Image: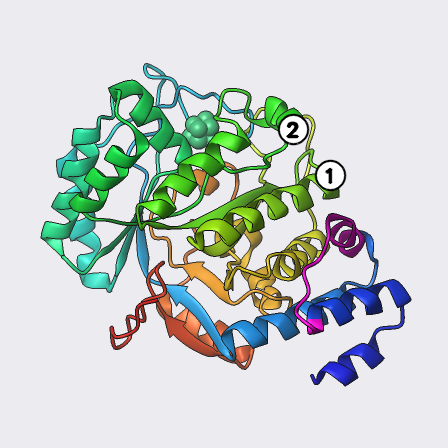
Amino acid sequence: MEPDNLLNYISDSNLKGIAKKVLTGNRLSKEEGIFLFEYPEIFEVGLLADFVRKKKVGSFAFYGNNLNINHTNICEMHCPICAFSKNENECGSYTMTLEEIFNKIKKYKHTGIEEIHIVGGVNKNITLKYLEDMFSGIKEINRDFHIQALTAVEYDYITQKEGYNLNTVFKRLKKAGLGSIPGGGAEIFNREVRKIITPNKISGERWLKVIKVAHREGIKTNATMLYGHIESYAHRIEHMIALRTLQDKTGGFQAFVPLTFHPWNTNLQDKVKEKTPLYDTLKVIAVSRLMLDNFDHIKALWMYMGKECIELALHFGADDMGSTSIEEQIVKSAGGQSNNLLTDRDFKNLISRAKRIPMRVTSNYRETGDGRRET
Ligand code: SF4
Protein backbone atom coordinates (compact mmCIF):
# COMPACT_ATOMS: atom_id res chain seq x y z
CA MET A 1 0.00 0.00 0.00
CA GLU A 2 1.25 3.47 -0.88
CA PRO A 3 1.78 5.95 2.01
CA ASP A 4 -1.09 8.23 0.92
CA ASN A 5 -3.53 5.33 0.68
CA LEU A 6 -2.40 4.13 4.06
CA LEU A 7 -3.09 7.52 5.64
CA ASN A 8 -6.52 7.66 3.98
CA TYR A 9 -7.35 4.29 5.50
CA ILE A 10 -6.73 5.57 9.03
CA SER A 11 -9.61 7.53 10.56
CA ASP A 12 -8.34 8.32 14.06
CA SER A 13 -6.38 11.58 14.23
CA ASN A 14 -3.94 10.31 16.89
CA LEU A 15 -3.12 7.21 14.91
CA LYS A 16 -2.78 9.34 11.78
CA GLY A 17 -0.19 11.45 13.64
CA ILE A 18 1.74 8.31 14.60
CA ALA A 19 1.48 7.00 11.03
CA LYS A 20 2.95 10.24 9.66
CA LYS A 21 5.90 9.89 12.05
CA VAL A 22 6.44 6.28 10.98
CA LEU A 23 6.21 7.13 7.27
CA THR A 24 8.78 9.89 7.65
CA GLY A 25 11.14 7.69 9.65
CA ASN A 26 10.64 9.41 13.01
CA ARG A 27 10.95 7.47 16.24
CA LEU A 28 7.89 6.72 18.40
CA SER A 29 7.70 7.71 22.07
CA LYS A 30 6.66 5.60 25.06
CA GLU A 31 3.24 7.27 25.11
CA GLU A 32 2.71 6.55 21.42
CA GLY A 33 3.68 2.92 21.96
CA ILE A 34 1.13 2.56 24.76
CA PHE A 35 -1.47 4.24 22.54
CA LEU A 36 -0.83 1.63 19.83
CA PHE A 37 -1.48 -1.18 22.32
CA GLU A 38 -4.68 0.49 23.52
CA TYR A 39 -5.97 1.36 20.05
CA PRO A 40 -8.84 -1.01 19.25
CA GLU A 41 -8.48 -1.33 15.44
CA ILE A 42 -5.62 -3.79 15.18
CA PHE A 43 -5.84 -3.98 11.41
CA GLU A 44 -4.90 -0.32 11.08
CA VAL A 45 -1.89 -0.82 13.36
CA GLY A 46 -1.07 -4.00 11.44
CA LEU A 47 -1.14 -2.18 8.09
CA LEU A 48 1.33 0.36 9.36
CA ALA A 49 3.61 -2.37 10.74
CA ASP A 50 3.39 -4.28 7.47
CA PHE A 51 4.44 -1.15 5.59
CA VAL A 52 7.58 -0.88 7.75
CA ARG A 53 8.29 -4.62 7.40
CA LYS A 54 8.18 -4.30 3.63
CA LYS A 55 10.54 -1.34 3.67
CA LYS A 56 13.03 -3.32 5.79
CA VAL A 57 13.05 -6.74 4.12
CA GLY A 58 10.97 -6.51 0.95
CA SER A 59 9.08 -9.66 0.06
CA PHE A 60 11.33 -12.12 1.88
CA ALA A 61 10.26 -14.18 4.89
CA PHE A 62 12.92 -16.15 6.74
CA TYR A 63 13.03 -19.52 8.46
CA GLY A 64 15.65 -22.06 9.49
CA ASN A 65 16.32 -25.76 9.90
CA ASN A 66 17.63 -26.41 13.37
CA LEU A 67 17.99 -28.96 16.14
CA ASN A 68 17.43 -27.94 19.76
CA ILE A 69 19.71 -29.22 22.47
CA ASN A 70 18.47 -28.55 26.00
CA HIS A 71 21.58 -29.99 27.63
CA THR A 72 20.34 -29.86 31.25
CA ASN A 73 17.07 -29.15 33.00
CA ILE A 74 18.69 -28.78 36.44
CA CYS A 75 18.42 -25.13 37.43
CA GLU A 76 19.24 -23.02 40.48
CA MET A 77 16.88 -20.18 39.57
CA HIS A 78 13.44 -21.66 40.34
CA CYS A 79 11.60 -19.12 38.21
CA PRO A 80 7.81 -19.18 38.73
CA ILE A 81 7.35 -18.83 34.96
CA CYS A 82 9.20 -22.08 34.26
CA ALA A 83 7.76 -25.54 33.64
CA PHE A 84 11.04 -27.01 32.41
CA SER A 85 13.52 -26.88 35.27
CA LYS A 86 14.08 -29.44 38.05
CA ASN A 87 16.18 -29.72 41.20
CA GLU A 88 19.33 -31.82 41.04
CA ASN A 89 17.91 -34.96 42.66
CA GLU A 90 14.35 -34.62 41.44
CA CYS A 91 12.80 -37.37 39.34
CA GLY A 92 13.22 -36.48 35.65
CA SER A 93 16.25 -34.22 36.14
CA TYR A 94 19.08 -34.70 33.67
CA THR A 95 22.38 -33.36 32.34
CA MET A 96 23.49 -34.68 28.97
CA THR A 97 27.02 -35.97 28.54
CA LEU A 98 28.94 -34.64 25.57
CA GLU A 99 28.67 -38.05 23.96
CA GLU A 100 24.87 -37.97 24.27
CA ILE A 101 24.79 -34.51 22.70
CA PHE A 102 27.02 -35.52 19.80
CA ASN A 103 25.02 -38.73 19.23
CA LYS A 104 21.79 -36.76 19.09
CA ILE A 105 23.27 -34.37 16.51
CA LYS A 106 24.61 -37.29 14.44
CA LYS A 107 21.14 -38.87 14.56
CA TYR A 108 19.60 -35.79 12.92
CA LYS A 109 22.55 -34.82 10.70
CA HIS A 110 20.99 -36.37 7.60
CA THR A 111 17.74 -34.36 8.01
CA GLY A 112 19.29 -31.16 6.64
CA ILE A 113 19.74 -29.30 9.94
CA GLU A 114 22.02 -26.29 9.59
CA GLU A 115 21.95 -24.86 13.07
CA ILE A 116 22.20 -26.16 16.63
CA HIS A 117 20.25 -24.13 19.18
CA ILE A 118 21.42 -24.74 22.75
CA VAL A 119 19.87 -23.53 26.01
CA GLY A 120 19.52 -25.19 29.37
CA GLY A 121 19.14 -24.64 33.09
CA VAL A 122 21.53 -22.68 35.29
CA ASN A 123 23.34 -25.72 36.64
CA LYS A 124 26.37 -25.50 38.94
CA ASN A 125 27.87 -28.61 37.33
CA ILE A 126 28.11 -27.02 33.88
CA THR A 127 31.63 -25.69 33.36
CA LEU A 128 33.17 -23.41 30.76
CA LYS A 129 35.29 -26.38 29.65
CA TYR A 130 32.14 -28.50 29.10
CA LEU A 131 30.69 -25.73 26.92
CA GLU A 132 33.93 -25.27 24.98
CA ASP A 133 34.16 -29.02 24.37
CA MET A 134 30.51 -29.11 23.35
CA PHE A 135 30.84 -26.31 20.78
CA SER A 136 34.13 -27.54 19.32
CA GLY A 137 32.78 -31.11 19.18
CA ILE A 138 29.72 -29.91 17.27
CA LYS A 139 31.98 -28.12 14.80
CA GLU A 140 33.92 -31.36 14.34
CA ILE A 141 30.69 -33.09 13.31
CA ASN A 142 30.04 -30.36 10.75
CA ARG A 143 32.06 -27.17 10.65
CA ASP A 144 29.24 -25.40 8.80
CA PHE A 145 26.75 -25.82 11.65
CA HIS A 146 25.80 -22.45 13.11
CA ILE A 147 25.78 -22.65 16.92
CA GLN A 148 23.34 -20.33 18.64
CA ALA A 149 23.66 -20.86 22.35
CA LEU A 150 22.83 -19.91 25.93
CA THR A 151 21.00 -17.05 27.57
CA ALA A 152 22.56 -14.01 29.22
CA VAL A 153 21.58 -15.64 32.52
CA GLU A 154 23.74 -18.69 31.76
CA TYR A 155 26.69 -16.53 30.65
CA ASP A 156 26.43 -14.41 33.77
CA TYR A 157 26.35 -17.52 36.00
CA ILE A 158 29.39 -19.13 34.41
CA THR A 159 31.44 -15.95 34.78
CA GLN A 160 30.50 -15.60 38.47
CA LYS A 161 31.06 -19.29 39.21
CA GLU A 162 34.44 -19.61 37.49
CA GLY A 163 35.75 -16.12 38.24
CA TYR A 164 36.27 -15.01 34.63
CA ASN A 165 35.08 -11.76 33.16
CA LEU A 166 32.45 -11.75 30.43
CA ASN A 167 34.95 -10.80 27.71
CA THR A 168 37.04 -13.89 28.44
CA VAL A 169 34.03 -16.20 28.45
CA PHE A 170 32.76 -14.84 25.14
CA LYS A 171 36.23 -14.94 23.53
CA ARG A 172 36.77 -18.57 24.56
CA LEU A 173 33.32 -19.73 23.47
CA LYS A 174 33.53 -17.85 20.19
CA LYS A 175 36.85 -19.57 19.51
CA ALA A 176 35.19 -22.92 20.27
CA GLY A 177 32.44 -22.27 17.72
CA LEU A 178 29.75 -20.03 19.24
CA GLY A 179 28.01 -18.23 16.36
CA SER A 180 25.29 -16.15 18.03
CA ILE A 181 23.15 -15.81 21.16
CA PRO A 182 19.40 -16.42 21.16
CA GLY A 183 18.39 -13.59 23.53
CA GLY A 184 16.44 -15.51 26.17
CA GLY A 185 16.17 -14.55 29.83
CA ALA A 186 15.15 -10.96 29.09
CA GLU A 187 11.50 -11.64 30.09
CA ILE A 188 10.28 -8.14 31.06
CA PHE A 189 12.96 -5.78 32.37
CA ASN A 190 10.73 -4.01 34.92
CA ARG A 191 12.02 -4.73 38.47
CA GLU A 192 8.63 -5.18 40.14
CA VAL A 193 7.45 -7.62 37.48
CA ARG A 194 10.76 -9.51 37.65
CA LYS A 195 10.43 -9.89 41.43
CA ILE A 196 7.30 -11.95 40.79
CA ILE A 197 8.07 -13.87 37.62
CA THR A 198 11.83 -14.49 37.96
CA PRO A 199 12.94 -13.34 41.45
CA ASN A 200 16.36 -15.05 41.33
CA LYS A 201 17.38 -14.19 37.81
CA ILE A 202 19.77 -11.38 36.90
CA SER A 203 18.22 -7.92 36.70
CA GLY A 204 17.16 -6.33 33.44
CA GLU A 205 20.14 -3.97 33.71
CA ARG A 206 22.54 -6.93 34.04
CA TRP A 207 20.90 -8.72 31.08
CA LEU A 208 21.52 -5.63 28.94
CA LYS A 209 25.12 -5.39 30.20
CA VAL A 210 25.88 -9.04 29.37
CA ILE A 211 24.45 -8.61 25.88
CA LYS A 212 26.34 -5.35 25.37
CA VAL A 213 29.62 -7.15 26.11
CA ALA A 214 28.68 -9.94 23.68
CA HIS A 215 28.02 -7.35 20.98
CA ARG A 216 31.35 -5.67 21.70
CA GLU A 217 33.01 -9.08 21.29
CA GLY A 218 31.46 -9.32 17.82
CA ILE A 219 28.76 -11.82 18.76
CA LYS A 220 25.32 -11.00 17.38
CA THR A 221 22.28 -11.73 19.51
CA ASN A 222 18.52 -11.68 19.44
CA ALA A 223 16.38 -10.08 22.12
CA THR A 224 13.31 -11.73 23.60
CA MET A 225 10.35 -10.41 25.57
CA LEU A 226 8.06 -12.73 27.52
CA TYR A 227 4.53 -11.31 27.44
CA GLY A 228 1.02 -12.34 28.43
CA HIS A 229 1.53 -12.81 32.19
CA ILE A 230 1.28 -9.94 34.72
CA GLU A 231 2.94 -7.16 32.74
CA SER A 232 1.23 -3.96 31.56
CA TYR A 233 1.44 -2.29 28.17
CA ALA A 234 3.80 0.27 29.72
CA HIS A 235 6.16 -2.52 30.84
CA ARG A 236 6.25 -3.93 27.32
CA ILE A 237 7.01 -0.55 25.77
CA GLU A 238 9.71 0.27 28.36
CA HIS A 239 11.29 -3.11 27.56
CA MET A 240 11.31 -2.34 23.84
CA ILE A 241 12.76 1.14 24.41
CA ALA A 242 15.61 -0.31 26.52
CA LEU A 243 16.44 -2.68 23.65
CA ARG A 244 16.19 0.09 21.09
CA THR A 245 18.57 2.24 23.14
CA LEU A 246 21.17 -0.55 23.34
CA GLN A 247 20.78 -1.25 19.63
CA ASP A 248 21.60 2.41 18.91
CA LYS A 249 24.89 1.90 20.75
CA THR A 250 25.99 -1.53 19.50
CA GLY A 251 23.95 -2.52 16.44
CA GLY A 252 24.36 -6.11 17.68
CA PHE A 253 20.72 -7.23 17.76
CA GLN A 254 19.46 -9.19 14.81
CA ALA A 255 15.88 -10.06 15.67
CA PHE A 256 13.30 -9.21 18.29
CA VAL A 257 11.60 -12.38 19.47
CA PRO A 258 8.38 -11.96 21.46
CA LEU A 259 7.60 -15.11 23.47
CA THR A 260 4.03 -15.85 24.45
CA PHE A 261 3.79 -16.99 28.07
CA HIS A 262 2.36 -20.50 28.52
CA PRO A 263 1.09 -20.78 32.10
CA TRP A 264 0.49 -24.50 32.28
CA ASN A 265 2.66 -26.46 34.75
CA THR A 266 4.23 -23.22 36.04
CA ASN A 267 3.90 -21.59 39.47
CA LEU A 268 2.07 -18.68 37.86
CA GLN A 269 -0.84 -20.72 36.59
CA ASP A 270 -3.07 -19.63 39.49
CA LYS A 271 -2.47 -15.99 38.55
CA VAL A 272 -2.52 -16.44 34.78
CA LYS A 273 -5.20 -18.89 33.76
CA GLU A 274 -4.91 -18.77 29.98
CA LYS A 275 -2.50 -18.05 27.19
CA THR A 276 -2.91 -14.48 25.94
CA PRO A 277 -5.36 -14.26 22.99
CA LEU A 278 -4.37 -14.14 19.33
CA TYR A 279 -5.50 -10.50 19.21
CA ASP A 280 -2.89 -9.55 21.80
CA THR A 281 -0.12 -11.54 20.12
CA LEU A 282 -0.73 -9.81 16.79
CA LYS A 283 -0.57 -6.45 18.56
CA VAL A 284 2.77 -7.36 20.14
CA ILE A 285 4.16 -8.20 16.70
CA ALA A 286 2.83 -5.02 15.11
CA VAL A 287 3.79 -2.65 17.94
CA SER A 288 7.29 -4.12 18.23
CA ARG A 289 7.82 -3.60 14.50
CA LEU A 290 6.82 0.05 14.92
CA MET A 291 8.72 0.76 18.13
CA LEU A 292 11.93 -1.10 17.21
CA ASP A 293 12.84 1.03 14.22
CA ASN A 294 16.50 -0.09 14.43
CA PHE A 295 15.78 -3.86 14.35
CA ASP A 296 15.66 -5.52 10.94
CA HIS A 297 13.79 -8.65 11.96
CA ILE A 298 10.72 -9.50 14.03
CA LYS A 299 10.48 -13.21 14.69
CA ALA A 300 7.17 -15.03 15.24
CA LEU A 301 7.93 -18.43 16.79
CA TRP A 302 5.36 -21.08 15.93
CA MET A 303 5.89 -23.20 19.03
CA TYR A 304 5.04 -20.23 21.25
CA MET A 305 2.34 -18.57 19.15
CA GLY A 306 0.83 -21.45 17.22
CA LYS A 307 1.01 -22.21 13.52
CA GLU A 308 -2.14 -20.29 12.55
CA CYS A 309 -0.91 -17.22 14.39
CA ILE A 310 2.48 -17.04 12.69
CA GLU A 311 0.76 -17.10 9.32
CA LEU A 312 -1.24 -14.04 10.34
CA ALA A 313 1.81 -12.48 11.98
CA LEU A 314 3.42 -12.24 8.53
CA HIS A 315 0.79 -9.58 7.75
CA PHE A 316 1.32 -7.71 11.02
CA GLY A 317 5.03 -6.91 10.73
CA ALA A 318 6.80 -10.25 11.28
CA ASP A 319 9.33 -11.39 8.68
CA ASP A 320 10.92 -14.41 10.38
CA MET A 321 9.04 -17.61 11.20
CA GLY A 322 11.68 -19.19 13.43
CA SER A 323 12.95 -22.69 12.80
CA THR A 324 11.99 -26.32 12.66
CA SER A 325 13.19 -26.62 16.30
CA ILE A 326 13.51 -30.39 16.37
CA GLU A 327 13.56 -31.78 19.95
CA GLU A 328 12.57 -28.49 21.63
CA GLN A 329 11.72 -29.19 25.31
CA ILE A 330 11.28 -25.88 27.17
CA VAL A 331 8.05 -24.52 25.75
CA LYS A 332 6.73 -28.08 25.32
CA SER A 333 6.94 -28.51 29.13
CA ALA A 334 4.52 -25.57 29.53
CA GLY A 335 2.01 -26.79 26.96
CA GLY A 336 3.53 -25.33 23.76
CA GLN A 337 3.20 -26.85 20.30
CA SER A 338 6.70 -28.17 19.80
CA ASN A 339 5.72 -31.82 19.60
CA ASN A 340 3.84 -31.00 16.42
CA LEU A 341 6.74 -30.18 14.11
CA LEU A 342 6.82 -27.84 11.16
CA THR A 343 8.99 -29.14 8.35
CA ASP A 344 11.03 -27.29 5.76
CA ARG A 345 8.20 -27.88 3.29
CA ASP A 346 5.61 -26.57 5.79
CA PHE A 347 7.56 -23.32 6.14
CA LYS A 348 7.84 -22.91 2.38
CA ASN A 349 4.10 -23.54 1.91
CA LEU A 350 3.12 -21.24 4.73
CA ILE A 351 5.32 -18.39 3.51
CA SER A 352 4.29 -18.82 -0.13
CA ARG A 353 0.59 -18.75 0.85
CA ALA A 354 1.27 -15.31 2.36
CA LYS A 355 2.72 -14.23 -1.03
CA ARG A 356 6.24 -13.89 0.37
CA ILE A 357 9.47 -15.43 -0.83
CA PRO A 358 10.77 -18.11 1.57
CA MET A 359 14.43 -17.77 2.42
CA ARG A 360 16.11 -20.42 4.56
CA VAL A 361 18.79 -18.91 6.78
CA THR A 362 20.84 -19.44 9.93
CA SER A 363 20.28 -17.12 12.89
CA ASN A 364 22.92 -14.77 11.46
CA TYR A 365 20.71 -14.47 8.37
CA ARG A 366 23.20 -16.34 6.24
CA GLU A 367 21.25 -17.77 3.36
CA THR A 368 21.73 -21.51 3.41
CA GLY A 369 19.96 -22.42 0.19
CA ASP A 370 23.08 -21.47 -1.75
CA GLY A 371 25.15 -20.58 1.30
CA ARG A 372 26.31 -17.23 0.02
CA ARG A 373 24.79 -14.41 2.04
CA GLU A 374 26.10 -13.40 5.45
CA THR A 375 25.03 -10.15 7.13
S1 SF4 B 1 13.35 -20.04 33.13
FE1 SF4 B 1 15.49 -20.65 32.79
S2 SF4 B 1 16.58 -19.78 34.55
FE2 SF4 B 1 14.40 -19.83 35.13
S3 SF4 B 1 14.10 -21.81 36.16
FE3 SF4 B 1 13.64 -22.13 34.00
S4 SF4 B 1 15.55 -22.87 33.10
FE4 SF4 B 1 16.06 -21.91 35.06
Q: Which residues are magenta?
A: 23-37
Q: Nearer the viewer, residue 85 or 76?
A: 76
What's under tag 2, amino acid-wise?
A: Val
Above or below residue 233? Residue 14 is below
Left or right of 246? Residue 157 is left
Left or right of 202? Residue 70 is left
Category of crowding for the residue at label 1, using alpha-carbon neighbours closer than 10 angstroms: few (below 14), some (14–19), many (at least 20) = some
Left or right of 297? Residue 16 is right
State which tag comes first along the sequence, 1 or 2. Answer: 2
Identify the mark at residue 193; answer none if there is no mark.
2
- In the picture of the structure, the residue carrying the numbered disc 1 is 232
Q: Where in the figure is residue 46, as x and y percent of width and height?
A: 70, 67
Q: Quadrant of the N terminus?
A: bottom right
User: How many numbered marks have been drawn onto this rendered protein structure?
Assistant: 2
Above or below residue 356? Residue 241 is above
Q: Nearer the viewer, residue 71 or 54?
A: 54
For image coordinates 59% across by 43% down, the residue present is 242
Identify the mark at residue 372; answer none if there is no mark.
none
Q: Quadrant of the C terminus?
A: bottom left
For image coordinates 19% across by 49% down, the residue present is 105
For image coordinates 42% across by 53% down, the residue present is 252
Q: Are marks 1 and 2 in contact (CB under 8 Å)?
A: no
